[in-house]
Each structure stands twice: as structure tokens, then as C-alpha cells.
Image: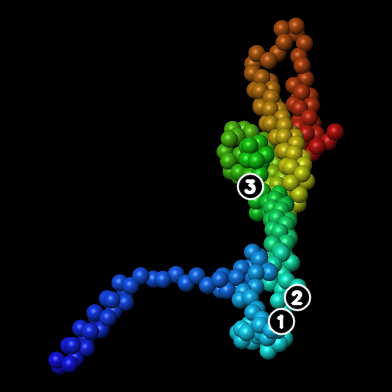
Amino acid sequence: MKRILITSTLAVVFAHCVSAQTVISIQDKALKAQQERMVITRWGNWLPKPKYFLGIQLNPNYTATWGWAAPKSRRYKEGPDIRPLAAHGKQTQRMALTEELKRDTDKYKSYTDSMARDATTEITSTSGLFSSTDPLWLLYYSKEMQGVTDYALHDVVGSLTEYEKLYLAKAGTIDWYDEQMLILQEKLNAAFNQDIDRGSRIIDYHNLLLEYRKLQRKWFTTISLANKLKNLESAMRSPHATPNGGVTRNRGSDVEIMEKIMHRINNHIE
């Protein structure tokens, strides 16, 4: 136990002494020259120098490293600069080629990014999945065509008076209007969901809007004529309908004329 304690103490003291010593920097000219030759600093600083006496090489290390006793691969002292990091060295050329390839890669990346942006723009402008985000649809056509997108027959019929319902149903106008609105709604859904370019989609929206407005004008014109016919029938049933001039009008002919007008309108006869 005592021997182990003494040994441990000596080891600690020795380690402390070693760590307390100053690190000495080795300045070897030959080592420094070799480091400079490995990079692009210098090439011709060859150390150690050969030492001759009476034509005999006195430095065996030089003879074994660079002289006749050295391998052929090391006998390049007087030859061309073969450093990999020289101005024309293989490593320098490799780094230059890598940098050139990097620039080409960046160009191709920029080109592919541009193609990706163009493809994304084309998809968003042609795909029906993104038609609801079109600014022109959001700002204008969605509001103008709301009567088509939200169309429901019971809402339209519910806004009519009893006389208008009876007359339009008898004339077949309600069924005709419902059929035309459903066709228009189907066309709008097709233009909204199909994959076409944005210009063609906007043109379809505009043409459908014109059809919708024309249909609405016919619908309200029919309602207005129905109300006029009602007012005319009420006036004919009134006891004060006879003119003061003593000439009686043919009431039946007025009703027939109005019914003919309504028949022409309902059947779209020009």
C-alpha cells in the first residue's frame, strides 16, 4: 500500500513538472522550405543544400532524398513544378474546375427555378382548382353571377305574388325559367372547374353574364306583362269602365290581344 502511494505521488509530481515546462518552437529551415514547396509560396528553396568535397557528396541524407540513391519519383528538384497547389497544379486546376461547375450549377438552378415559377403560374391560371382565387372573379364576376351560383327555384317563386304564380305557372313560364337557369348554372360550373387558360375562362364568364342578363330581362318583362294584364282585367270588371262618349269598347278583344302578346312572349315568338 505504501509503495502504491509513493508511486502515485511521484507520477503526479512528474506530470506537474512536465506541464510546467515551456514549449519550445522548433525552427527548422529545411522543414519550413518543404512547407513552402508544398504550396504556391516558393518552389526553388531546396534545403538542405548539397555539400561536396572533392566531388564527393558529404550529406548522406541529401543523397538518399534527392541524389542518385533516391527513388525516381523524388528526383524532381531540377524538373518542372509538380506541386498540386502551384499556379498550374492539378489541385489548383481541380478547384478552378469545381468553381466553374458551381457557377454552371447555379445557372441551371436559376433556370430551373424560373421554369418552376412559370409552371406554377401556368397551373394557377389554367387549373380549375385555383379559379376561385382569380382576382377578376372575386372582384366582379362572383358578384354579378351570384344569382346563378345561388339559384334556387323556391326562392324565385317565393318572391312572386299569388296572381303571378298562377299566371306564370299556367303559361309554363316558371318551368321554362327554371330550365334556362339550370342550364346557365351548369355552363358556369363547367367554365369554373375546367382546365383552360385564364383568358378563355374570363370570356366564358362574360358570355354567360350576358346570357344571364338577357334571361333576367325576359323574366321580369313577363312578370310586368302579367301584372298589366291583371290590371286590365280589373279595369274591365269595374262598373266605371265604359267611356263617357257613349261608345263601348270591345273588352273581349283587349283581353284576347293581351293573351296573344303573352303567348308570343312565353313561346319566344318574334
- Which residue has dot 3 on it? 132
- Dot 1, crowdedness within 10 Å: few (<14), some or many (≥20)? some
Real-space Cα separation, disc 2 to disc 3, in angstroms: 75 Å
Say which of 57 and 152 sits in front: 57
- Say which amino acid is labelled 1: Arg
Is the residue under label 3 in contact with that under label 2 (CB below 8 Å)?
Answer: no
Tell me which numbered mark, 2 or 3, is placed earlier along the sequence. Answer: 2
Circle on res. 75:
1
Circle 2 crowding by C-alpha within 10 Å: few under 14, some 14–19, many from 20: few
Residue ID for mark 2: 79
Look at the picture and state if 142 lies above or below 240: below
Cα distance in 3D space between marks 1 and 3:
78 Å
Q: x and y percent of residue 211 in the render? A: 75, 39
Q: Nearer the viewer, residue 7 or 91?
A: 7
Q: Amino acid at mark 3?
A: Ser
Q: Position of residue 178 (x, y in %)?
A: 68, 44
